[in-house]
Image: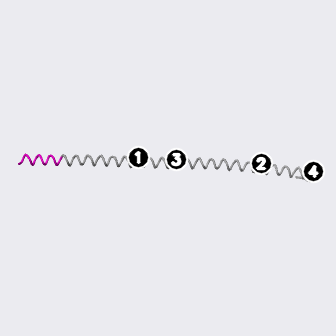
């Protein structure tokens, strides 16, 4: 009977250790999965920031181009007015 009790005790220990190892595997999987999610979220956020920066630069370039075109039109208009005034004998 003692021998059987020891066999049962050893079996229980093996079952408990096996369960612990399986749980450890689950925990490692959860940690790895959580870390991957954090890394993926960080990459997504970084991509959004880079994209927003690119949009800001593009918008800035477009605004600069529009401002230069407007300034050029203003300059040409002033030149036309000056020529008109000169034809009328007036100063610019």
Residue matched to label 3: 47
Left or right of residue 13, residue 49 in this image: right
Q: Nearer the viewer, mark 4 or mark 3?
A: 3
Q: Residues within 10 Å of mark 2 (few under 14, many from 20)?
A: few
* Disc sitting over residue 72 in the figure: 2
Rounded to the nearest angstrom, the CA distance separating label 4 from label 3 is 60 Å
Residue at 89% from the left image edge and 51% from the top image edge: 84
Q: Residues within 10 Å of mark 3 (few under 14, many from 20)?
A: few
Rounded to the nearest angstrom, the CA distance separating label 2 from label 1 is 53 Å
Rounded to the nearest angstrom, the CA distance separating label 4 from label 2 is 23 Å
For the residues labelled 3 and 1, say whether their Cβ atoms are less than 8 Å apart: no
Pointer 4 or 1: first along the chain: 1
Image position, residue 23 (x, y; %):
28, 49
Image position, residue 89 (x, y; %):
94, 52
Instruction: Indicate the secondary structure of the residue bearing disc 1.
Output: helix
Instruction: Indicate the secondary structure of the residue bearing disc 2.
Output: helix
Q: Residues within 10 Å of mark 4 (few under 14, many from 20)?
A: few
Q: Nearer the viewer, mark 4 or mark 1?
A: 1
* Disc sitting over residue 87 in the figure: 4
Instruction: Indicate the secondary structure of the residue bearing disc 3.
Output: helix
Rounded to the nearest angstrom, the CA distance separating label 4 from label 1 is 76 Å
Relative depth, front residue between 6 and 70: 6
Residue at 78% from the left image edge and 50% from the top image edge: 73
Pointer 3 or 1: first along the chain: 1
Q: Is residue 56 magenta?
A: no
Residue matched to label 1: 36
Relative depth, front residue between 76 and 19: 19
Q: Which residues are magenta?
A: 1-13
């Amino acid at each position: 009977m003692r021998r059987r009790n020891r066999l049962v005790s050893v079996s229980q220990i093996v079952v408990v250790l096996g369960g612990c190892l399986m749980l450890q595997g689950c925990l490692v999987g959860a940690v790895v999965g959580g870390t991957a999610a954090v890394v993926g979220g960080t990459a997504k956020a970084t991509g959004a920031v880079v994209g927003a920066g690119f949009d800001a630069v593009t918008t800035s370039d477009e605004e600069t181009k529009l401002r230069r075109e407007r300034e050029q039109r203003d300059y040409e208009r002033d030149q036309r007015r000056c020529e008109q005034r000169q034809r009328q004998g007036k100063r610019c």
